[in-house]
Image (cartoon, grey):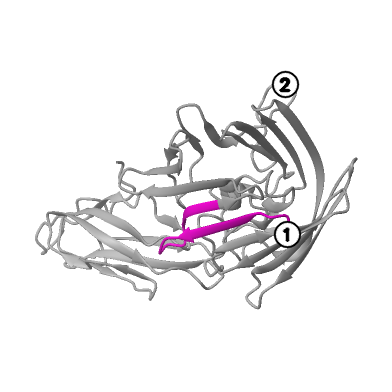
């Protein structure tokens, strides 16, 4: 792993005049840059630094602590960094400086931790955790979480009594995210990036992940202009194509897809469905509860569970949809909130004029 910085005066400092010669300085293996960004539900990190002389770390924050703040020279030190969840609704910073205790003005280096206001799934750090969703057309969903507010179990039951169960594991030692189904034949996994998210999950015959859209000349479109969420899983293929027109996709940014194209193909029997929807948004924030409620726009049967759980954060628009319009008609969404601004109830009126009510418990 590459080191990112050395003491300001250099890794080896030579005293002059009446002072004795001395060596002082620091070489970091981790963090790998002077600013390290972590999510609102990130709980730990490490500092790994080689010190030529005796050292001390200065700096403090009530939400960020380092397990060891002083040590001897000619040593390699690995320290645990602990973070408290960020429930402030705003990003925050903690700065630390390591100094050679014998030569504090000549040998020192600083770094910063920036903690986002949002969790890895795009919800705010104090967002309420949705435990159940029930719909007036006979669907029910239950979700459980770990201590870091990450979904670990998902269960749905459709009106005909058919059950779907999903288990999610986060192997931080191996850096793997795995989604397991009850049957075991559709298990998928991928490299777990920051925020406990994956770019792609793959299995024996299945793939889920982000996909590019392309210009007519074959060049890929930048993701902050347009991208796809593509899934071949559970015996069906789904593609959700989002148009953003240049909005930022940084973790704490506000972004709402301008339009959505939805394509579904099932194997048994073979069928296709395509929706092309222009989206309008309400004033309500879609980050105040753990799930992405916009995924219920087309109904439970068309909803992708991993998008509902926000395992692919970029598909979560940060405001709640109020209207979706196509050549075939209009979908209208009415939303009722709890006191903490999480969604209590949604009523979705489809293009056929029929209402479906979704009730949420926490």
Quarter holding the C terminus is bottom right
Q: Nearer the viewer, residue 223 or 328?
A: 328
Q: Nearer the viewer, residue 122 or 158?
A: 158
Horizontally, residue 222 falls left or right of residue 6, namely right
Q: Quadrant of residue 75?
A: bottom left
Please tell me in which quadrant of the rendered image residue 354 appears: bottom right
Estimate how packed mark 1 is, as few (under 14), some (14 to 19) or many (20 or more) residues with alpha carbons within 10 Å.
few
**Tag nearer the camera, 2 or 1:** 1
Query: Residues in magenta?
Result: 136-155
- 281 vs 129, left or right, is right
Drawn side of residue 350 relative to residue 317, left or right: right
Judge left or right: residue 157 versus residue 243. left
As drawn, 190 above or below 41: above
The residue carrying mark 2 is 217
**Residue farthest along the bottom direction in this orientation:** 339
Residue 226, horizontal then vertical, whole percent: 69, 39
Provide residue 82's location: percent of width, then percent of height.
Answer: 33, 65
x and y percentages locating residue 211 in the rendered image: 61, 33
Q: Residue furthest front?
A: 160
Given residues 208 and 237, the one toward you in this image is 237
Whether residue 56 appears in magenta in the rendering, the answer is no
- Where residue 203 appears, as percent x and y from the top left, is 46, 31
Q: Secondary structure at mark 1?
A: loop
Question: Is residue 152 found inside the magenta-colored segment of the image?
Answer: yes
Is residue 235 visible in the rendered image? The answer is: yes
| Residue at numbered disc 1 | 136
Residue 8 shows in this picture: no
Q: Residue furthest top?
A: 217
């Amino acid at each position: 792993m590459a080191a990112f910085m050395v003491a300001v005066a250099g890794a080896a400092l030579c005293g002059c005049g009446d002072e004795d010669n001395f060596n002082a300085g620091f070489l970091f293996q981790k963090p790998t840059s002077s600013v390290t960004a972590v999510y609102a539900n990130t709980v730990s990190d490490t500092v790994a630094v080689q010190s030529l002389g005796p050292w001390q770390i200065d700096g403090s924050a009530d939400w960020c602590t380092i397990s060891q703040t002083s040590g001897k020279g000619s040593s390699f030190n690995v320290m645990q960094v602990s973070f408290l969840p960020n429930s402030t609704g705003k990003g925050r910073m903690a700065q630390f400086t390591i100094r050679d205790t014998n030569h504090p003005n000549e040998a020192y280096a600083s770094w910063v931790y920036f903690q986002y206001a949002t969790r890895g799934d795009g919800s705010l750090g104090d967002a309420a955790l949705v435990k159940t969703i029930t719909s007036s057309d006979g669907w029910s969903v239950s979700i459980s979480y770990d201590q870091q507010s990450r979904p670990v179990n998902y269960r749905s039951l459709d009106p005909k009594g058919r059950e779907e169960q999903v288990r999610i594991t986060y192997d931080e030692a191996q850096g793997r995210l795995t989604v397991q189904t009850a049957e075991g034949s559709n298990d998928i996994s991928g490299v777990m990036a920051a925020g406990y998210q994956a770019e792609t999950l793959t299995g024996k015959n299945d793939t889920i992940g982000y996909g590019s859209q392309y210009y007519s000349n074959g060049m890929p479109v930048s993701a902050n202009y347009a991208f796809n969420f593509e899934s071949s899983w559970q015996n069906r293929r789904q593609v959700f194509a989002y148009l953003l027109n240049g909005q930022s996709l940084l973790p704490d940014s506000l972004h709402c897809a301008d339009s959505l194209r939805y394509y579904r193909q099932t194997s048994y029997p073979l069928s296709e469905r395509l929706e092309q929807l222009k989206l309008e948004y309400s004033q309500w924030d879609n980050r105040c509860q753990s799930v992405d409620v916009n995924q219920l726009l087309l109904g439970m049967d068309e909803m992708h569970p991993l998008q509902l759980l926000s395992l692919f954060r970029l598909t979560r628009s940060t405001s709640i949809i109020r209207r979706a319009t196509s050549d075939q008609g209009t979908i209208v969404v009415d939303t009722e909130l709890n006191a903490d601004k999480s969604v209590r109830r949604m009523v979705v009126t489809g293009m056929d004029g029929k209402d479906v009510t979704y009730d949420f418990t926490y």
